[in-house]
Amino acid sequence: MLPVKVRSPSLQRKPICKASKGENMASFEPLSKHSAAIQIVARICVVALLLNLSGCAKVKDFLDFRKTTEEPKDLTVKTLVAKGMDDYAIGKYFTSLEYFQEILDRFPFAPEATLAELKAADCNYFLEHYAEALVLYEAFEERHPTNEAMPYVMFQKAMCNYKQIDRVDRDASGAEKAIQLFSQLIRAYPDSPYVGEAKARIKAAREFIANHEFFVVDFYLRRDKISEAETRLKYLLANYPDTEIAPRAQKLLNQIQSGNPPKQSLSSWLPKISLPDWARFSSSDQEKTVEEAPSKE
């Protein structure tokens, strides 16, 4: 029988950490957690090393979330026109305007600059920057008085004023200016496709001004200024006799002249305080034009 070897107690494996008296062994973290942390640090170091290697451009691109795709600078004028028109066609007027403005800045004497001038005005118009658009349309008209797009430019000039018409209790100068410009278009280009809509919008603007005048009459009557109200009614009937509110104005004038002016506010007499829909004044046999530039410019 082989002898059995007995290991001395002094040679037995001792625990790495020994809790002192009164100390809980659970307070010591196991070594596995420290190992996981070391592995994470090692992986980060490997990734950092890969990013610094010259042959790892694809890895850099994949991990660099801040990288953005930028268009090359110094685009040709034809490329700028194409990009500007593409954005314009889908209603991206802000970026389209940037392309056209770059054409005007870098290629002011290029043949494409004329188109860029007009489209820059159009972009401002559709962005509802009517004052800025009006300035650009006027500049285009001054530089290119014989351009084939001139009927459209005149129509858009009128529309810039028309779009700024607000309410009858406010200034009506925008409506008056719009009527003036629409009338100029009709006289200068009577066969233009914009004439039908111009006439309808003139009627709508005249209705607005007539309602504005009637509102002023109401203002005077509420302050017992009968004489001023009578004068304003006569002006309304003399200048806007064909408007929808003219019969009411005539009835009120008759009351005042008979010595029986109304005692209450006339605001309820007003059909609307805003600009009427121009389409109501468009003839059925007239084609309604669309507020866009002509296809051939």
Image (tube, rainbow, N blue to C red):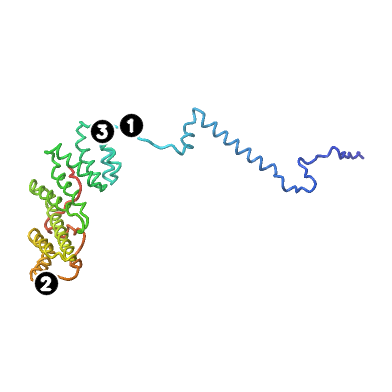
> CA–CA distance between discs 3 and 1?
14 Å
Q: Do the residues labelled 3 and 2 touch (CB within 8 Å)?
A: no
Q: Where is mark 3, residue-wise?
A: 105
Q: Is mark 3 on a helix, strand or loop?
A: helix
Q: If the image is split into quadrants, where does the C terminus sit? A: top left
Mark 3 nearby-residue class (10 Å; few <14, some 14–19, many ≥20): few
Which residue is nearer to you in this view: 163 or 261? 261
Q: Which x, y percent locates residue 153?
A: 16, 44
> CA–CA distance between discs 3 and 2?
67 Å
Marked residue nearer the N-terminal end (1 or 2): 1
Describe residue 7's horizontal placement relative to residue 210 as left or right: right
Mark 1 nearby-residue class (10 Å; few <14, some 14–19, many ≥20): few
Marked residue nearer the N-terminal end (3 or 1): 1
Q: If the image is split into quadrants, where does the N terminus sit? A: top right
Residue 116 occupies which quadrant of the picture?
Answer: top left
Q: Which x, y percent locates residue 182?
A: 12, 50
Q: What residue type is labelled 2?
A: Asn
Q: Do the residues labelled 3 and 1 touch (CB within 8 Å)?
A: no
Which residue is nearer to you in this view: 171 or 282? 171
> CA–CA distance between discs 1 and 2?
76 Å
In the depicted structure, whether residue 267 falls above or below residue 171: below
Q: What element carries label 1?
A: loop
Q: Which x, y percent locates residue 24?
A: 75, 48
Q: Where is mark 2, residue-wise?
A: 260
What's the mark number on residue 73? 1
Q: Are marks 1 and 2 in contact (CB under 8 Å)?
A: no
In the depicted structure, whether residue 207 falls above or below residue 66: below
For the residues carrying marks 3 and 1, which lies nearer the camera in this image? Answer: 3
